[in-house]
Image (spheres, grey):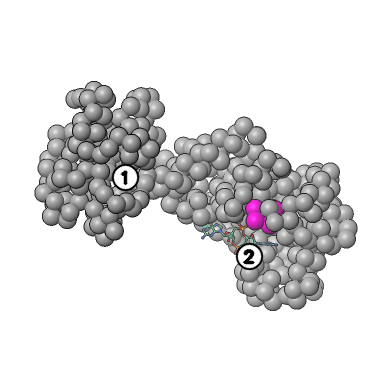
Amino acid sequence: MLTTLIYRSQLDSSCHSDALNVLVDHARLRNAALGITGIMLYNGQDILQVLEGSEEQVEALFQRIVMDKRHAFVVELMRDYGPRRRFENVGMLLFDLQISSPKTVLQSVLRYSKLESYIVSDDRVFKFIQSFITRENNARQHRDKPAEAWTLSCEPHPLGEPLGLIAGQSCQFALQPIVEPYEGKISSFEMLIRGNDGGNPEQFFANLDSAKIYEVDLQTKAYAFALAKSLKIGSHKIAVNLLPMSLVNVPGAVEFLVEQIQLSGLQPEQVIIEVTENEMISGFNTFNKAIKALRGTGIGFAIDDFGSGYAGLSLLTKFQPDKIKIDREIISNVHLSGPKQAIVKSIVSCCTDLEITLVAEGIEKLEEWRWLESAGIRRFQGFLFARPQLNGVGDIHWPHMLR
Ligand code: C2E
Ligand code: MN
Ligand code: MN
């Protein structure tokens, strides 16, 4: 199947633009043999390349480019399928924007492509090319020290050691910190439910009588607050997860939460309830009353797994939480994906306008963290910084710049 792939990268600083000509000459020969055509645009720093050919050959070539040390910050912008090549019979053309004016480059790209203008005007491939050519220098893609310039140093957590479980306790909790690496600050601890056998939330809930799920979910929060107290949580914030129906179906649910929070010597303002986006959407109307009651007590509210559902943005037209946690699916390998980057940028812009605090969750790589910081996110949760630890807090790994 004829595939078109566009990526952006930065030419490694050790690689001169003369070397780029050599690179493209080599590429032209090799690509001809693989049946790959396309163009490469270069502006002195950034590269935009369009590759077209069979799906297998394009994918194999792109994987080689990702591994190629001469390309830094390779980001895939687009992958699509179509009936015809845009650059039939041209091999691989190089356009250097340092030598020719944007207008000249644009004209020759169009001349080589030989496509009808009605196809070109709405074509995403040409729109990517046009934006790259006409982009002002000050709007260049973000530059950053590579992830290798950073290292992590392990520090013990600031909390106390837990006491034993409470008699009859039906579950346990694992704590995972949410951190602000630049400030060296812990912004809160999320308390994740575990079975008494250490099993994950899914297993814990699967073992319950389905009629009891909401009630149990609510009641287990008492153990979470008690654990926070025994860990000497002090003025740190804690976040717990809750099915929204636990607040709607269980009579007196909000009062129960407040009572248990106070019994553990905590303040309602210290506690954040996290509800996943999907649950929020499906039950919004019935849930709305419970949210109001919750807000009335001072308890904080966060939308979890934002972006995983089908109506996240329209949800925000009806209700704006204190905090939004961007779903791990979107965060994972965000440094490599143009579409993920565009979505994160739009969430950042939306939450900045609405003064909603953003958390990125599921950070496993320094590269992901670097990109998200550069996009304006300051709070992070993920294995890179700390793993959840049963009945306590594990070591926290803080990033430092290498000298
Ligand atoms: P969540 O609230 O989105 O919690 C984050 C989940 O991602 C946790 O899984 C955590 O262990 C995992 N995680 C954190 N950092 C990373 C990372 O860097 N990489 C990867 N691969 N995973 C990471 P866990 O503990 O299995 O919890 C799964 C879900 O179960 C939670 O997702 C939450 O929606 C739900 N849950 C947890 N506790 C409760 C609870 O008390 N009540 C209810 N109703 N749901 C709960
Ligand atoms: Mn959560
Ligand atoms: Mn989540």
* Residue located at (24% from left, 47% from top): 85
Q: Nearer the viewer, residue 287 or 168?
A: 287
The residue under label 1 is 6
The residue under label 2 is 390
**Residue 36: percent from the left, percent from the top?**
20, 51
Do we see residue 232 in this rendering? no
Q: What number of labels is visible?
A: 2
Badge 1 density bin: few <14, some 14–19, many ≥20, Cα 10 Å:
many
Callout 2–callout 1 Cβ contact below 8 Å: no
Give the residues drawn in magenta, as a range: 275-280
Q: CA distance from mark 2 to mark 1?
A: 44 Å
Q: Amino acid at mark 1?
A: Ile
Q: Nearer the viewer, residue 174 or 210?
A: 210
Say which element carries label 1.
strand
> Horizontal placement of 205 versus 330: left or right?
right
Say which element carries label 2.
strand
Please, is residue 36 above or below residue 371 in the view? Answer: below
> Horizontal placement of 42 versus 31: left or right?
right
* Residue located at (72% from left, 60% from top): 243
> Horizontal placement of 172 versus 337: left or right?
right
Main SS class of the magenta portion in the image: helix
Q: Is residue 68 magenta?
A: no
Badge 2 density bin: few <14, some 14–19, many ≥20, Cα 10 Å:
some
